[in-house]
Amino acid sequence: MAFHDLKILAVRPQGGDAVAITFDVPGDAADKFHFTPGQYLTLRAEIGGEDVRRSYSICSPRKSGRLEVGIRAIEGGRFSGFASALKPGDMLKVMPPEGRFVVAPGGGGHDYLLIAAGSGITPMLSIAASVLEEEPESQVTLIYGNRTTNSIMFREELEELKDRYLDRFQLLHVLSREDQDVPMLNGRIDAEKLRVYAEKGIIAPASHDGIYICGPGDMTELAAATMRELGAPDSRIHMELFTPAEGSLPTASERAAKAETASGKVEVETILDGTRRRFTMDGKKQTVLEAAHEAGVELPFSCAGGMCCTCRCRVSEGKAEMDVNYSLEPWELEAGFVLACQSRPHSEKIILDFDAV
Ligand code: FES
């Protein structure tokens, strides 16, 4: 998927050292940048002589005509540090929207539960605003965790939504380092709190049409497990991880042991936008993405950490195994999809189809 050079129209400071960046999409690229609420953009820049890519969720409502992402500064974060100095008129390389953590509003009335922490609010803001605007009979409950009031991203936008859709939008701010009058809103979003909300009828895990959870891995895994425990079927729970859960990253020796089982000299063929490219690689030493990069074969990627799914492809011949997978769903694994950034071949030849859907 090709990057487009987009001009920055506006940079708006947000709580928690974050910025909202709005892009100017030229008319001839407008079709490519139509998005479904919940999708993300991959941004690319040369920082300190290195090609750096990061994905950020679109936070604007679908019908607003705005293409905006929210970027929170991370300590030592190369891209977020770079982004905090961006200003209107600057150009950035931007890949068209991607991602399957989406709600496509428009069909009837639904009841959505959104659970977010920190910058996990970005896709939720787009989802909530789009649903409330486009589905006049739908209800949205958003549980949003932060440290303090000042670290809340998009606080004004959320309050505006609450005022505009008083009877259809329920918003709970949960703060871990600032006491609020209502004790059940103090602390982190955890299993106990979610159980209390369910007991009090604030949420109804077994009956929400869709439960969307986004934020750090620990919170998303825990919230999803609690939703299951409270009766939510798996098919209605959707997660987007911004960082892997603590303890879920393999150690260096676990990675090395996995790499050792991969095939040595492998012939790789990739299919991307209908074009076939070939190269050879050593699965014991590299992932498919690393080998492609070395061979000068451009493949789509962003996080390179198994979370964003930008490098998703289907194995149409041969066999591959992944070091980690934080984003592919069980049906995708069954259908033969893998993440190129995590895959090592386990056969002498492998064909990876990046056009498969
Ligand atoms: S590049 Fe993000 S999952 Fe592979």
Image (cartoon, rainbow, N blue to C red):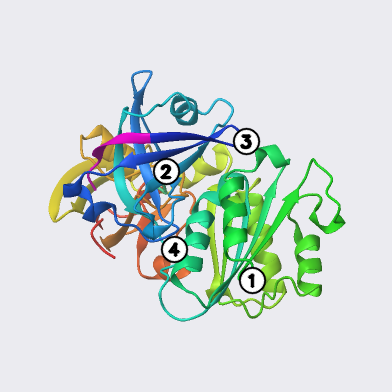
- Residue sitting at the far left: 275
The reply to whether the residue tagged 4 has its Cβ within 8 angstroms of ligand 1 is no
Residue at position x 47%, y 66% in the image: 133
Mark 2: give few (<14), some (14-19) or many (20+) Cα within 10 Å: many
Residue type at tag 4 = Val
Magenta-span inclusion, residue 288: no
Instruction: Please identify, in this view, whether the residue under mark 3 or under mark 4 is nearer the observer.
Output: 3
The reply to whether the residue tagged 2 has its Cβ within 8 angstroms of ligand 1 is yes
At which x and y percent is residue 164? 57, 62
Residue type at tag 1 = Asp
Label ID, residue 102 = 4
Q: On the rendered structure, is 293 left or right of 203?
A: left
| Lower position in the chain sequence, tag 1 or tag 2 | 2
Q: Which residues are drawn in magenta?
A: 1-9
- In depth, the one of 155 and 268 nearer the eye is 155
Are circles 4 and 1 on residues that touch, CB within 8 Å?
no
Q: Mark 2 sits on what residue?
A: 55
